[in-house]
Image: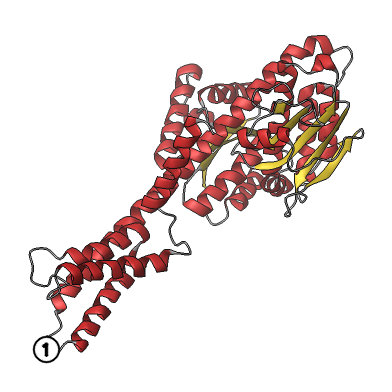
């Protein structure tokens, strides 16, 4: 294990100890143990007054406060009730009975509840911020992957145009449609994927394997006659540990004559590093085993994994809007899930133009000023052109600013504003009960 991975593991353990996952299995046991330990310390250090009633500071209430900050209102209240029950029990067992200190325990209970509310509020904010950053990291990873794929595709286009009439872009587009159509399986369109890799990466014998519940690797599809993949294969272990492609010439493998029957093993990973399966190659031309070709292989597998990851949501969206771009459909379903699960809001802005040269020119200008995260969708609706712009992670202030920029662009470059263009804008908030129905209703109305 490298020094960096060791630091990451230690940091993860420290984070889990100081800020554990809310409401885990051991939460209630921890609540009881922390409270009883605080009572035990009080008995040991101040036997006559273990609850420090009337003292300078009630140290025993740090236990419910700590529990409330870690887990929320309910566990903090339970810890406070344990203190009350302990006081009642100790008073019952003592020879001299005292009156119940109502203000003391009421104040402590209110303090624990306030700390629990504070913990819940900031825990929700932290989870939303983490999900927002996770979405942005995943989006950046997908964009980087596609840019790299585009560059590699352009590098090969000139030398392959005479022998391969179908471009890589067309092939990947067809693969995306197949994964969306067969999205109900774990590895949809795995055989077309192998055929595409055979064509562009010169594979001769390879297979895609999926891990079973027992830990064995089951063959999903194959080209040629590759051997079975063992769970203890050194190349597989290296690929899973480093989350990257592995081959026989990499450093770090055991110095043996044949560590694996395969030449290359590549994990099929989504942008958020979720493992779908592995590609194992046991035969390919010697000249094809180069850095550029292996890079192309990894990028195409990552593209396929993202297509599979977003296939279910995209398929439901495309059933309602068959002409929608695949990127729009995938991001819409992903952002809708973020809204439903974490309350992270996004918007769709729909603008209507006349279907003429000036309208198309206005759309081109608006496309030029869109944010980097935005995804446009042009819709032809009778004698009107609709421009639907999906704005991820955009609040109402961002929507208002976007509309103001559009008006400024129209006035600056076209010399006209909203009224002269007869431009109508519609805003669809993903916080609505059914934003998909709102979008469908809007397009149908504009079509009529």
With respect to residue 217, does 340 lie above or below? Answer: below
Disc 1 element: loop
Look at the image and tell me in which quarter the C terminus lies. Answer: top right
Q: Residue at x 80, y 38 (%)?
A: 208
Pick whichever, 24 or 216, lies toward us.
216
With respect to residue 439, does 254 lie above or below? Answer: above
Q: Quadrant of residue 108?
A: bottom left
208 left or right of 106?
A: right
Pick whichever, 354 or 15, lies toward us.
15
Q: Quadrant of residue 265?
A: top right
Q: Residue at x 76, y 45 (%)?
A: 210
Describe the colour scheme in one phrase.
secondary structure
Crowding around mark 1 (Cα neighbors within 10 Å: few <14, some 14 to 19, many 20+) is few
Q: Is residue 393 visible?
A: no
Look at the image and tell me in which quarter the N terminus lies. Answer: top right
Q: Is residue 247 visible?
A: yes
With respect to residue 251, does 136 lie above or below? Answer: below
Q: Quadrant of residue 296?
A: top right
* Residue at the disc numbered 1: 96
Q: Position of residue 202 (x, y in %)?
A: 84, 21
């Amino acid at each position: 294990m490298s020094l960096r991975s060791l630091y990451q593991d230690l940091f993860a353990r420290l984070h889990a100890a100081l800020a554990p996952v809310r409401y885990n299995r051991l939460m209630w046991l921890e609540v009881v143990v922390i409270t009883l330990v605080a009572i035990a310390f009080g008995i040991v250090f101040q036997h006559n007054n273990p609850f420090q009633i009337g003292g300078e500071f009630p140290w025993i209430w740090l236990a419910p406060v700590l529990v409330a900050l870690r887990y929320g209102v309910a566990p903090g209240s339970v810890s406070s009730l344990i203190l009350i029950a302990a006081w009642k029990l100790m008073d019952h067992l003592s020879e001299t009975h005292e009156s119940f200190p109502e203000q003391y325990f009421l104040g402590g209970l209110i303090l624990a509840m306030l700390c629990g509310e504070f913990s819940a509020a900031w825990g929700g904010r932290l989870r939303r911020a983490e999900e927002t950053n996770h979405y942005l990291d995943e989006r950046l990873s997908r964009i980087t992957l596609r840019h790299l794929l585009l560059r590699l595709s352009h590098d090969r286009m000139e030398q392959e145009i005479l022998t391969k009439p179908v471009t890589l872009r067309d092939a990947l587009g067809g693969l995306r449609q197949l994964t969306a159509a067969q999205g109900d399986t774990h590895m949809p369109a795995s055989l077309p994927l192998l055929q595409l890799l055979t064509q562009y990466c010169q594979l001769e014998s390879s297979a895609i394997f999926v891990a079973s519940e027992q830990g064995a690797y089951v063959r999903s599809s194959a080209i040629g006659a590759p051997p079975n993949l063992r769970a203890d294969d050194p190349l597989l272990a290296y690929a899973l540990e480093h989350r990257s492609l592995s081959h026989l010439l990499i450093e770090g493998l055991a110095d043996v004559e044949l560590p694996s029957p395969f030449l290359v093993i590549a994990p099929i990973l989504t942008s958020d590093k979720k493992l779908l399966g592995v590609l194992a190659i046991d035969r390919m031309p010697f000249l094809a085993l180069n850095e550029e070709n292996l890079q192309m292989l990894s990028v195409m597998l990552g593209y396929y994994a993202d297509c599979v990851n977003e296939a279910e949501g995209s398929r439901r969206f495309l059933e309602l809007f068959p002409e929608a771009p695949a990127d729009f459909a995938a991001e819409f379903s992903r952002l809708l899930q973020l809204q439903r699960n974490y309350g992270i809001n996004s918007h769709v802005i729909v603008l209507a133009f006349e279907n003429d040269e000036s309208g198309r020119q206005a759309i081109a200008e608006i496309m030029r000023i869109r944010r980097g995260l935005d995804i446009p969708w042009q819709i032809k609706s009778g004698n009107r052109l609709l421009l639907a712009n999906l704005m991820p992670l955009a609040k109402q202030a961002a929507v208002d600013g976007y509309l103001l920029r559009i008006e400024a662009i129209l006035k600056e470059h076209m010399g006209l504003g909203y009224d002269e263009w007869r431009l109508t804008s519609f805003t669809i908030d993903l916080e609505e009960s059914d934003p998909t129905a709102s979008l469908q209703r809007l397009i149908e109305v504009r079509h009529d």
